Image (cartoon, coloured by chain):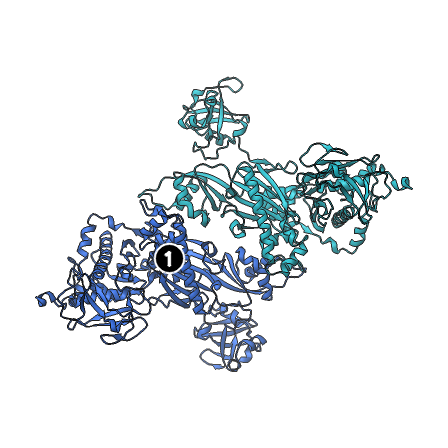
Chain colours: A blue, B cyan
Amino acid sequence: MECNVIFQPSGRRGKIAEGKTLLQASHELGVDIEAPCGAHKVCGKCKVKIETGFFEKFGIDSQMSHLSPVTEEEKKLLQEKEIAENYRLACAAEIHGDVLVFVPEESRKADQVVLETGKDRSFKLDPAVKTYYVEMPAATLEDHRDDLRRLQDALRDQFGLDNLSIDYFVLKELPNIIREGGWKVSASVLYDREIIDVRPGFVRQWYGIGIDVGTTTVAAYLCDLGSGKMLAKDGMMNPQVRYGEDVLSRITYAMMNEDGRRKLHDAIIEGINTLVERMTEKAGIKPTDVLEIVLVFNTAMHHCLLELEPKYMGRAPFAPAISAPFDVKARDLGIHISRAANIHVLPIEAGFVGPDNVSVLIAEEPYKQDEEVRLIIDIGTNGEIDLGNKNKLLSTSCATGPALEGAQIKFGMRAAPGAIEGIKIDPETLECTYKVIGDEKWHGRGSKGGAKGICGSGIIDMVAEVFKAGIIDKTGRINKKLETDRLRFDENGKPEYILVFAEDSAIGKDITVTQGDIRAVQLAKAALYVGAKMLMRHLGVNKVDRVTLAGAFGSYINKESAMVIGMFPDCDLEKVQAVGNAAGDGAQAALLDKGKRIEARDVAASVEFIETAVEPDFQQRFAEAMAFPHSVDKFPSIQHILDKIPDRKKKAV
Amino acid sequence: MECNVIFQPSGRRGKIAEGKTLLQASHELGVDIEAPCGAHKVCGKCKVKIETGFFEKFGIDSQMSHLSPVTEEEKKLLQEKEIAENYRLACAAEIHGDVLVFVPEESRKADQVVLETGKDRSFKLDPAVKTYYVEMPAATLEDHRDDLRRLQDALRDQFGLDNLSIDYFVLKELPNIIREGGWKVSASVLYDREIIDVRPGFVRQWYGIGIDVGTTTVAAYLCDLGSGKMLAKDGMMNPQVRYGEDVLSRITYAMMNEDGRRKLHDAIIEGINTLVERMTEKAGIKPTDVLEIVLVFNTAMHHCLLELEPKYMGRAPFAPAISAPFDVKARDLGIHISRAANIHVLPIEAGFVGPDNVSVLIAEEPYKQDEEVRLIIDIGTNGEIDLGNKNKLLSTSCATGPALEGAQIKFGMRAAPGAIEGIKIDPETLECTYKVIGDEKWHGRGSKGGAKGICGSGIIDMVAEVFKAGIIDKTGRINKKLETDRLRFDENGKPEYILVFAEDSAIGKDITVTQGDIRAVQLAKAALYVGAKMLMRHLGVNKVDRVTLAGAFGSYINKESAMVIGMFPDCDLEKVQAVGNAAGDGAQAALLDKGKRIEARDVAASVEFIETAVEPDFQQRFAEAMAFPHSVDKFPSIQHILDKIPDRKKKAV
């Protein structure tokens, strides 16, 4: 006999043979119901509600009695109230007549996941490490398969996973784990190929971490790979800075010092271990619960972290040891998560732009962009710029310096509590108000805002605002004749503008913007600007249609401020978007969706690298780009803002 | 134009297009010439001699001038004398006319290898780890492939190896190695899949070790994987004996002690590291030059060495953690050879007979035996017995105890210098002569032979000889009324027979055979005998056609002595063969020929295990087998020897 079964809210319906479970029916009708325990009646996830009554519209008469009686397992896994409300487990309830089934939101399979960082990015939830629950027959004298074979057979029979290998360190404890679980275990499998974790009983949680290792800052994201949810994020200064502030000085350190490579490696690995500890503690789990890490970084950090010989990368023809994506065991790198855990390294692009840019690309997906020309700027100590769309993608890198990450700025700091992340200056009064990370309120003179320093987004605001207020001129020079007590002079007679007075700050000192700060930002923004213009020339376009500003800042940078200081060529402000740490988002995406690793491999092979710094007119273009916003190019999109800038020189004269 | 080319001594001949090299000609004509550098003119191995003159028989006129002139490379790689004698490098000499080429023995490709241990076993030389010499174009700004891709491309183009991965620890140093070798390297590849070693320039030597880890003794064989030659062998007591003499006591130790598993593991790994150091030092190489180890052992040693939880193996249903063959990195086991080196573990048989028996089977190959029924006895603390032929193979294991390896014997010792390995006793005079390992001479009374103790083969001789001389009777009891000063009594009044007098020994004490020694050997030989008989019953045969005696003894055991004490059922002595450590030979075979690993996997799956100790009449059969040679069964093959045994009891009365 066949019965009418209808699933809501999808409305999918069909005839189902009597005796099948609701879960089987859902498979036949293409309805996604979450059943992580593989229909073993242990997880209680496949909860559905039976609507009873005569449904004229559907022509069926749905009754609870059309299902097999409530089982013991359901009594254990469902609340009494739920049973009273006609909830059933889809894996337990057998069909014996017409039924109308409602699948609640929480029972629908989440195959999409939205990142909590960056802009709202949504990816498929299809991690490289998946966890499968299996039940095995106990070993007997008649069925004397070895433990691994028994587990392999169960995974093959219950999930179609064939030819699985097992990590040696997992194998060591396998006999104990299997028996502790009473022949029921949850096995985590990497790439559907290798068993890298086995835990007793039904386990739904397993974890991964995406890490963006910048030259100056490290940002890490702990994710639940079962749900795709981000559980914690954390960051720190790259501990390698003690061996050199930029990549060239670190490579030099590695070359000139015995054990230099080892020391650079140890420093960043120790940093990662600290981040892992802090994040797992915050999430209430153990570091050994983490089964995978995805790493992104620039090419030099790639070699320094992996302890690959970096010296040939520092000189022509700049060949790296490896460009391809690869996987290595956590234990071989000294990372203290599960010993069998996988570390996945995204590929280096042709032309040796780092995995961090590949990560930005898989987060932003410009290769899916139809006609518009997109400019993506990833701001960091090494800036990376991409330009193009699905027809052609160019990339370049430029030596931005660490100014926009807070280094080389007198009161610069990492995006952390106490950092000023936003600044406004009144052009009339020259009064400054500011916003500190972790505090919604804007503070001004006489208000204790707890400011300790200024992070990246604040630095961009700071320079844009002093320019807009006429405190600096187009060349970046601070006007020494300002009529405000916010103007002060340092011991060398250099002028500074006071953002926060000592009595209002958390450090007992005036927080100021100095002439040196302005110069550092000018160098950084000019490098980015010229890089973008050179790519435009190579692509043969005069204008970009869309600009994306990425970077490991605490919060999004103010796109208007960024354009006012001339960080990138003119573009309709509506089409400019700040997205936060896109490289970090790409790392998370590659963690949660293994298809992203294929995209990364493909885009790394297809993007065309342009070495912009060797162009003959580079120096001249760079000099022109030092001015605010530029000494030659026009910015029609913000002309109305530029027009309002007071000419204090005239006023002061 | 085509030229006549003839290769001697094979006599292969044919027409070859002008301009081809002699090496290319050899490939076309199916002549194997060794060319390990891949015709790059760096190794000088493909040396051939050109015979000049008019060869009527072949109808050709061979001249040196029929070849291209001697190249610079040949002048470097050949001696002046060789050039004068018309030697050429086959890879360098181009054909421009008829030539008769003689390929000397040393230039012929060795694809067969004869083991130096055991009987003359010959295997294909086809190791799992192979070394390939490649030359790469240097990196330039135009050809900016990364180092790994460059190496992968060279291995693909020059040897057809595709999709090679690389061990992380090899990758780390790759940039330096490649440049040190001037873009010429020798890469060692595991299973044609993974690059596990890269060395600068042309390297012909790479090494592997086969290790048989017995309960009591460990035997190791260092081989040159390029030539198949054994360079060193060594052995030691298994350092785990300090935690228990037999497998059950070790498993119990592991279960009862925290860190017990770790301690057992550490002890044997430390032992292996010592053997590796001793053998590589002897061979003049470094431990890190060793790229693979093949391990064989019984199932309990398998788990104890690999640190797999052993406790469920000690009780029904005796399931091991893993039966399949597997590979693990040397670094993960703590074995100090190359960090990227592979450790290959042979499979456990169905029924949990250990990889050591699988190793015996791939050495002896009874599965290739046509009709004769073969009995293979591997003598060790755990004896393994195999019976059958290619139609059917049965196996069993029996608790022999360590007596035949020298343990539990008063003057027993490991096969090492100073150990008595052979004994003869004159039935008339009751005088004893003996042979000590490392000394060709037989010693007797008044001759200082340097004896320190007795090893396995000596122990079997010793028992056989005291029985043949009537010093013990059929039940094993020592005749207390012997008329010889070699009879003495210990402090408890127990009789002993003096093999070596104190003044002749190297230990200042009489070396004797005690009543206890006889009893220990009786238990061991009875266990082996009953095991063999039970298998015969299962196979339905009354007689075996051929017997092979294997064991990790210093030299071969005396087959006649073994049959006289009743270690195995009657068989024509001509068809009995002692082969030494067949398990060790199998480990070497699997090291030198990866095809043997497939054979191992297949035979492990097909051999049928018989649990003989649970048979209802086991106890009775065991009691019957205690007598010399047996209390019921007849031994027609040695009846003439048994007939000559003097009946000293009667004489003494």
Front position in the image: B391 or B562: B562
B284 left or right of A480 in image? right
Q: Residue at x 56, y 48 (%)?
A: B344
A362 left or right of A565 in image? right
Please state which amino acid type lies under the numbered disc 1.
Val
Can residue A144 be seen here? Answer: no
- In the depicted structure, whether residue A1 falls above or below residue B355: below
Where is residue B446 shown, x and y percent of the image? 76, 33
- In the depicted structure, whether residue B48 falls above or below residue B361: above
Which of the 4 quarters of the picture holds residue A91?
Answer: bottom right
How many numbered circles are shown?
1
Q: Residue furthest right?
A: B653
Q: Residue at x 32, y 72 (%)?
A: A438
Front position in the image: B479 or A125: B479
Where is residue A79 shown, x and y percent of the image? 52, 79
Where is residue B215 shown, x and y percent of the image? 66, 50
Q: Which of the image's four quarters has the C terminus of chain A?
A: bottom left
Front position in the image: A172 or A601: A172
Question: Disc 1 designates what residue?
Answer: A296
